[in-house]
Image (cartoon, grey):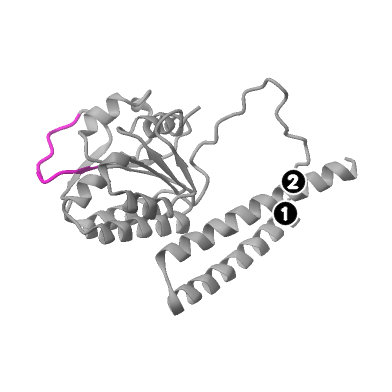
């Protein structure tokens, strides 16, 4: 491999590393301030150093993991869409209904990844919109945000649990247990406007903070769908600070 290609590959990796580092900083700034922010940043820097050293040792043991092949897309070739199961990432879909988010989850299902669905709509309706709901792996679950406690018998093999929109503590516990029990799992989070009807916006944001922290801790992925017209514009902007990438409502999956 010539020197120009080596430099190109190094710079690409350096650029991506810088992007991820600043995303981390922005996320912390949106949640903390003062001494709390300082301690969180210092803690995160320590964690990053540890992760880098761990990767260094891993590569020493197996240098073949490194590939210097040129992966540029040929002219006229359609680039493959990024799929949201990169460990620790969070993706926000702004759409009237969780259509694009469910399209992505259909691809996640084909990869055999367990999913926790947090939805306002009937699980039967959500399952009907997935391309191959029958392939959901064992361990996938539904949390149905509803004021009614009773759940009718379901033919689906996926466990369904109803949770009151006012029970954010119970919802947090379910999410934390699911992520810690399933390696690199995905959480679909919709129904945020419904939660705001029963909780202060600040508490709903804290729930998002908690989910993002759990996602990063357990190397999972968060996929959130929200109708932009259903929440306050300021709240939506605060929400965006928790996500690594935001997909607009029209043409987001192209």
Residue underneath mark 1: 59
Which quarter of the figure has residue 110?
A: top left
Residue 63 visible at all: no
> Which residues fall within the magenta stretch?
143-154
Q: Name the residue under label 2.
A: 66
Placement of 50 over or under 120, stated as above or below = below
Label 2 neighbour load within 10 Å: few <14, some 14-19, many 20+ = few
Q: How crowded is mark 1: few (under 14 residues within 10 Å), some or many (20 or more)?
A: few
Name the residue rendered at 71%, 53% in the picture. 14
Q: Residue farthest to the top?
A: 76
Residue under the image location 72 percent in, 54 percent down: 59
Which quadrant would the N terminus be assigned to in this image? top right
The answer to whether mark 1 and mark 2 are in CB contact below 8 A is: yes
Q: Is residue 143 visible?
A: yes
Residue 153 x/y as whole percent? 14, 33
For the residue pair 116 and 74, the one nearer the viewer reads as 74
Look at the magenta stretch and give its main secondary structure. loop
Label 1 to label 2, Cα distance in Å? 8 Å
Question: In the visual, does 126 lie left or right of 27?
Answer: left
Residue at 72% x, 25% y is 74
């Amino acid at each position: 491999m010539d020197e120009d290609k080596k430099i190109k590959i190094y710079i690409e990796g350096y650029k991506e590393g810088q992007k991820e580092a600043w995303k981390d900083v922005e996320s912390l700034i949106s949640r903390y301030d003062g001494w709390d922010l300082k301690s969180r940043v210092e803690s995160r820097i320590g964690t990053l150093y540890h992760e880098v050293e761990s990767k260094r040792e891993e590569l020493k043991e197996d240098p073949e993991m490194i590939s210097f092949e040129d992966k540029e897309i040929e002219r006229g070739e359609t680039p493959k869409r990024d799929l949201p199961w990169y460990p620790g990432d969070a993706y926000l879909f702004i759409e009237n209904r969780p259509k694009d988010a469910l399209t992505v989850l259909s691809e996640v299902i084909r990869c055999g990844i367990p999913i926790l669905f947090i939805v306002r709509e009937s699980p039967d309706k959500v399952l009907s919109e997935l391309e191959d709901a029958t392939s959901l792996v064992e361990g996938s679950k539904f949390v149905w945000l509803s004021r009614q406690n009773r759940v009718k018998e379901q033919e689906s093999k996926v466990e369904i649990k109803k949770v009151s929109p006012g029970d954010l503590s119970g919802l947090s516990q379910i999410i934390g247990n699911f992520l810690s029990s399933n390696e690199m799992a995905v959480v679909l989070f919709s129904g945020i406007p419904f939660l705001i009807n029963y909780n202060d916006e600040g508490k709903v944001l804290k729930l998002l903070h908690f989910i993002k922290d759990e996602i990063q801790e357990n190397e999972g992925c968060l996929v959130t769908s929200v109708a932009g017209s259903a929440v306050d514009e300021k709240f939506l902007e605060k929400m965006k600070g928790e996500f690594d990438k935001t997909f607009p409502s029209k043409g987001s999956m192209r």
